[in-house]
Image (tube, rainbow, N blue to C red):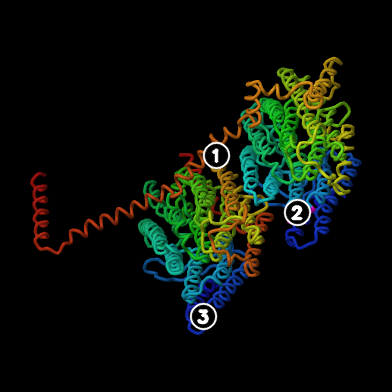
Amino acid sequence: MLDLIWLLPTYPLLGFLALVLTSGRLPKKIVGIIGAGSVGLSFLTAAIIATQFLAGGEDYFVKEVWAWMAVGSFTPGFSFYLDGLSLVMMLVITGVGFLIHLYATGYMADDPSFSRFFSYMNLFVAAMLMLVLGDNLVLLYLGWEGVGLCSYLLIGFWYTNPANGYAARKAFIVTRVGDTSMAIGLFLLFAQLGTLNIQDVLHAAEAEWAVGSGLAIAAALLLLGGAVGKSAQLPLQTWLPDAMAGPTPISALIHAATMVTAGVYLIARTHILFEIAPSVQLLVAWIGLITVLMAGFIALTQSDIKRILAFSTMSQIGYMFLALGVGAWSAAIFHLMTHAFFKALLFLASGTVILSVHHEQNIFKMGGLRKKLPVSFASFLIGSLALTAFPFTSGYFSKDEILLAALEMDGPGTILWVGGVLGAFLTGIYTFRLFFIVFFGENKGHVPENEVGGIHMNGPLFLLMILSLVGGFIAIPVESVFSHGEVHEEHHVSTLIHGFMIAVPLIGIVISYLFFYAKIFSIEKLMSIPISQTLHRFWFSGWGMDWLYDRLIVFPFLWLSKINKADLIDSFYAFIVKFARASNAMIVRTQTGYIRWYALSIAAGLVVLISIGVLL
Amino acid sequence: MILVWLISILFVGGIIAWLSERINPAYPRIIALITVVLDLLLMLSVLGSEPNAGGWIASVNAEWVPRFGISFYLALDGLSVLLILLTGFLGVIAIGSAWDEIKERAGFFYFNLLWTLAGVLGVFTALDLFLFFFFWEVMLIPMYFIIAIWGHENKNYAAMKFFIFTQVTGMLMLVSILMLAYFHLVQIGNLSFDYHDLLRIEMGNQIEMWVMLGFFVAFTTKLPSVPFHSWLPDAHSQAPTAGSVILAGILLKTGAYGLIRFAVPLFPEASLSFAPIAMTLAAISILYCAKVAFAQTDIKRLIAYTSVSHMGFVTLGIYAWNEQALQGAVMTMLAHGLSAAALFMLAGGLQHRIHTREMPDMGGFWVKVPRMAVVALFFSVAALGMPGLGNFVGEFLALLGAFQANIPITVISAFGLILASVYSLWVIQMIFHGEYTDKKIDDSHLTDLNGREMFYFGAMMLGLVWMGMYPQSFLNLSQPVLVELLNNTQSIFAAVVQN
């Protein structure tokens, strides 16, 4: 059965081909069955394979399907590698992916391009599975670029609006900057180590490179470049909020649960490389922490329901990077999984809200939706609690592990911990700000008639609610993957500090409650202070990063293109042509036909020649 | 003998196609199609034969002008096979794209088309340098007519520019060829234009560099590379679609082929010391032309500049001169041959339907022509180097190999991957995305791709998927040739490095 692992990406790939080749001629019902069914089949296969793999007790399993190319010593293959890490990833991708596909059959039911939507979705799942199952970095890169392409196609799915096209291109190009860094990293690894098979690269790097050597640092940095692009971390984070232009199931699948966590997967997969480049590993922690805080502050100011969730995603992936940076590899993957549950839940629920209030996304035009939208309300309640790490929800366990690991790290660990706790505090505020404004108080815009739903949409929500609540009790089988470097000891933290950690996000919730529910504190009063207005503007614009990049990169590039549309080099040849024509015109003028002119010029020429002769 | 057949079928077919027009104006295209399909089948039949000890699958060598050491020497190895197959395949496609477009003087058109193809086959197989130069000219002149007669609004300027660029640099190559033959006379005692004889010639460093440059300039003009590229945008924007297909798909590749077959092997020492300059020119081509491409509003000019940019990866790979880099260059030639030809056909199809090439006049076409949009998306995505399609294999291998030869230039060139996505996605946005509103254009003929068009686009898509998913079928053919070339130069390089 393990041998059939290649079926995992094949099912959705076949679904994609079937939908593309019929190009919208199939009835929606059949499209839905193909689209969601192919991913469902993948999930079933993955579940069976996972059970067998775990029962078998092997550390890993490799299946070579065919040799991709062989050029000298460069021999990447279409080969799949299954271990605890890729097992968790494949289950999350196919499981959560299937639920989101199912939800989308309801959410997109009225869209004329239903079939196109599911073809892109299926292609995405296939590429994502290639990414996590590939046993070499080239196959991983294939999946990596493939998911980027699908992300582009789906963000720009409603292509008639140029803003969506802009968001789609921005997402693709910004992440491609990271991808290119990663590609150069691949070239470096191959040139130095002679292979791109992941396990061989890790073993060779460990054997050949000293800890902290320049090559190790360069290689880890280049891979990190790819990771920050895909995972929307500083400094390549600017594309994610705009990516919300896509249909909401996309935001749940690609921009919350799976693709944006690919960077976390990449670093975890190549963690040995980061261990022999400790300075880069520490950089990962700092990038994570700064992103946690920056995105947290931005989320406080946003008014679009999906953008708030997008910044929250950015911030939660920041936690995963923080975990990677302090060497808590399995905690990072654990948080990746729980985050996939509760963030998919929040995005899908926000989809239901948005449909129910007729495509309104501004939270200040909602309000009091608790009664009208009970399923969304329950989903948001549970999702928000998990997101803020409320005790015993799934997010609590994973975030707790990350912060404890940071605290126990030597050196800058304490600062990282303080920052992480502050981030959790912000999470409490912005999450429940959204929750209170949307579901309580007066309705300020659209009053929904009834909640959009049905079994297609509510079923997945219920399952995700359960997973968000109890997902923290799932034990992920990744010890054998990380046993190499991870310290396995019980956490020794005083109850007082631990209690403080648990309490901080709750204080955030209380503050949100006082501001947005009880209205004991007034947000208007706070906003009347000039400094808070300035901060609000600054944070609302995402710390001015878009502004900065526009001026540093985009505008100069556009300007350079504009002034050189006619191609400077061509004007050199144009000059030759002009020169030839001009000299021709000049010499033609000497052909006057008058004998006296010719006589004169002959005489003048003689005089010049003779004088030269005399002078020399 | 099969090589003579391959070429002469095209020459004869061309003449018959021309004459047949007098009987019926619809005959030339049918005769041309039959001729090229026949030729393609003949090429495929070669694939089965085993190469001899020297790696040659087929060859013919007859005396031509013995007094000057000129012979009629054609030979086929794995590298040539790949390129003549590309020629045959795109030849069929080019006739398909001209099928409805060329109405006037069709006989003479197909005559020129077939003669260009014959010239290209000669270039890819000639191993006598005089004969090589002869075919180099044969493919040039009919192409000049194709642009000058069946071109668009500014065709005379474009055709003349194409002719002068290629002719002037071709003359430089002729001088270099004559120099080589002369050196053979001085050193061995007789004139010879035979490739294998000339490989053995020793020249002084200075003179070798100058003679090499004659070849280099001719080949990089054809390729083209900065700074000799500026004829290409004009030629492409003015040429009829079939002309663009041949030009982008095949003619440019003769330049790359020349570099691999002649410029480096004949002058290994000069090439080694010249490599940093050539690679720098490649990097400039990649980045500079990607940027200029992005600025264009004329879709064909845009694609032309992207061609220069992609050919930069070929130059980069060739002058890195190791197995991965060379295989990358060859795969890029093949994959770009298909993707660029397809993009020019899409552009030509659009121009045929709405009589403009200006992208600002388009937009929102996805609603009107969804099939065309999907096809355009496919080839744009292929061109920007999506893994799983042929272009990725080529460019990735070229960069992978180049990194081992020159890290800074490779890193800079890799930024071309980013710029490729910038312009490719911009094209999709300008033409197919956005709202379809009242345009300045007349859209009464804006119809989706028909069955014939879908057939040849489908064939090209399958080709790119094949190259991307199982490139080994192609790599296996070129591998022994490239390894042989590498082995031959290795000892010379080692000696240079020791000194």
| Residue linked to disc 2 | A111
Q: Share a chain, discs 1 and 3?
A: no
Query: Up-down: is A179 above or below A456?
Result: above
The numbered mark at residue B236 is: none
Query: Up-down: is A53 above or below A573?
Result: above
| Residue linked to disc 1 | A554
| Residue B40 forms part of the magenta stretch | no
For mark 2, name the chain: A
Q: Position of residue B389 (x, y in %)?
A: 65, 54
Report the residue that reaches farthest toward the right.
A55
Residue at horizontal 68 percent and vertical 37 percent from the top? A241
State the residue in front, A311 or A479. Answer: A311
Specify few, some or many for label 1: CA neighbours under 10 Å numbering under 14, 14-19, or 20 or more: few
**What residue type is disc 1 on?**
Val
| Residue linked to disc 3 | B25
- Element under label 3? loop
Q: Position of residue A544 (x, y in %)?
A: 60, 31
Q: Which residues are magenta?
A: A109-119
For mark 3, name the chain: B
Q: CA distance from mark 3 to mark 2?
A: 49 Å
Q: Is residue B425 visible?
A: yes
Q: Quadrant of residue A592?
A: bottom left
Report the residue that reaches farthest toward the bottom.
B23
Q: Position of residue A368 (x, y in %)?
A: 82, 35
| Residue A115 forms part of the magenta stretch | yes
Q: CA distance from mark 1 to mark 3?
A: 53 Å
Going from the N terminus, do you reach mark 2 or mark 1 first? 2
**What residue type is disc 3 on?**
Pro
Q: Is residue A132 left or right of residue B321?
A: right
Residue at horizontal 37 percent and vertical 49 percent from the top? A572
Q: Are marks 3 and 2 in contact (CB under 8 Å)?
A: no
Q: Share a chain, discs 2 and 1?
A: yes
